[in-house]
Image (spheres, rainbow, N blue to C red):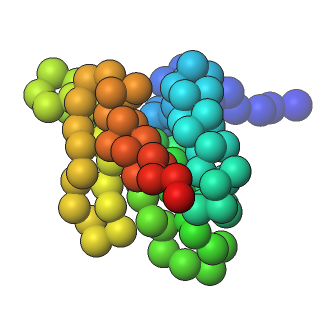
Amino acid sequence: MNFQVPPPSNLHHLPNEQVAFHRTELSVILSIYGRFVAAGEWRDYGISCLRDVAVFSVFRRTAENPMYRIEKRPKMRDKQGMYSIVGMDGQILRRGHDLKTVLRVLERKLIRAVD
């Protein structure tokens, strides 16, 4: 019986790499997400892991466009920082190297005056 073995270069072909959030990054993001859900501001989220970027999208309602996108772009690490917050209109609200400091722009929206 004859059979052909594929060439060695095809045996170890790895799938395309994806950018993803690490567990520590997700815990920081989900912490602030939980506070906004408790306040009744946010109701749903979505996570996308693509080749160049990982995106955590926040929705007020499921059928809407995302209110905010928390993006991780490792290629921007040496330039302006790999984390960014993008608003509904596509405007970058904050960009930086540390996720906690970037998320402070959202925490300010959570603080309200008590009557």
**Left or right, residue 42 beside residue 73:** right
**Residue drawn at x 37%, y 45% as measured from the top left:** 108
Residue 72 lies, with reference to residue 11, above or below; the image says: below
Residue 67 lies, with reference to residue 19, above or below; the image says: below
Picture coordinates of residue 8 (x, y %)? 54, 20
Picture coordinates of residue 28 (x, y %)? 54, 28
Q: Residue furthest front?
A: 115
**Left or right, residue 27 beside residue 78:** right
Q: Quadrant of residue 22?
A: top right
**Residue drawn at x 28%, y 71% as measured from the top left:** 89
- Quadrant into which the N terminus falls: top right
Picture coordinates of residue 51 (x, y %)? 41, 43
**Residue drawn at x 48%, y 67% as measured from the top left:** 66
Picture coordinates of residue 11 (x, y %)? 60, 25
Residue 93 lies, with reference to residue 83, above or below; the image says: below
Q: Residue furthest left?
A: 79
